[in-house]
Image (cartoon, rainbow, N blue to C red):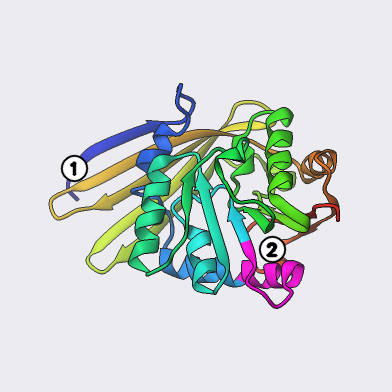
Amino acid sequence: MSAIATFRRLECGMADPAQPYDELAAHYDQIFEDWEASIARQSTVLADILDRECGDGRPIRVLDCACGIGTQSLGLAMKGFDVTGCDISIGAVQRARSEASKRGLSIPFSVANMVELSAIPKSSFDAVICIDNSLPHLQTDEDLLQAAQQAYGKLRPGGSFIGSIRDYDRLVVEKPTTQGPSFYSDNSSRRIVFQIWDWLDERRYRFHLYITRNTQSAWQTFYFTSTYRAVLRSELQRILEEAGFINIRWLSPSDSGFYQPIFIAHRNC
């Protein structure tokens, strides 16, 4: 095995919290064994939920308020949903735009923070989605409440706020310290993806992501770190209620087929 050629360190928690995600955008798809398959699989689950919660025979208007490189937005747009996306990271938004263009999709992507969605000119969406553990980046109840209020303000009366987080009710008890490693092959290329979790206290943990891949001449390791706050379902439900949402319920992975617990909350009519 060749020596590691480079070691890229990107750390979230700097003056500009989006900067590490700008560079992570180039590597994010490598977290998945098959990103295209994940796009299709996630969009199928979300499309079923959106059709059930918001469908009335017309195209469903969706705001993906933490779109990243487009994992959910792209799949939903390919299924005929009217999707708008935004993310705090300009690098992620640029990658999402590029991926949409490759697929012949017209999706307006903007740079915007989920706690301040005024940069998105549209409103009256049928649904706002926030998928794949994006909300726990927010470190305080105040920030979570502001994000929930911003989502509420972008919805039409009766619209749905749909999001997913890790199963923190279980994880705060188990306190796992590693995830993986997972070994993937892409034709002649190989990847190793693994995570280390350093628990800083009972509710916060430092997340370390390593992606090691072989190139033609050597192995290259990419490293990213960020801090998450383990939010319990009851806590998030209380915050959603404070923001004005009603009829809040949770779908477990066994209920939805998605890999994380999903919440569904409605704006009051």
Q: Position of residue 208 (x, y in %)?
A: 46, 37
Q: Position of residue 248 (x, y in %)?
A: 83, 54
**Amino acid at dot 1:** Ala
Please, which residue is most extreme toward the bottom here? 57
Q: Position of residue 13 (x, y in %)?
A: 49, 26
- Which label sits on residue 263? none
Q: Residue at x 40, y 62 (%)?
A: 100
Q: Position of residue 247 (x, y in %)?
A: 86, 56
Q: Is residue 50 left or right of residue 132?
A: right
Q: Which residue is mark 1?
A: 3
Q: Taking 155 as reference, is 114 above or below it? A: above
Question: What segment carries the magenta color?
Answer: 45-61
For residue 263, say whether it is visible. Answer: no
- The quarter holding residue 115 reads top right
Distance from label 2 to label 1 (Cα)? 40 Å
- The quarter holding residue 56 reads bottom right
Callout 2 secondary element: helix
Residue 218 painted magenta: no
Please, which residue is most extreme toward the front here? 121
Q: Which residue is mark 2?
A: 253
Assess disc 1: are there few (<14), some (14-19) or many (≥20) residues with their C-alpha within 10 Å of its C-alpha: few
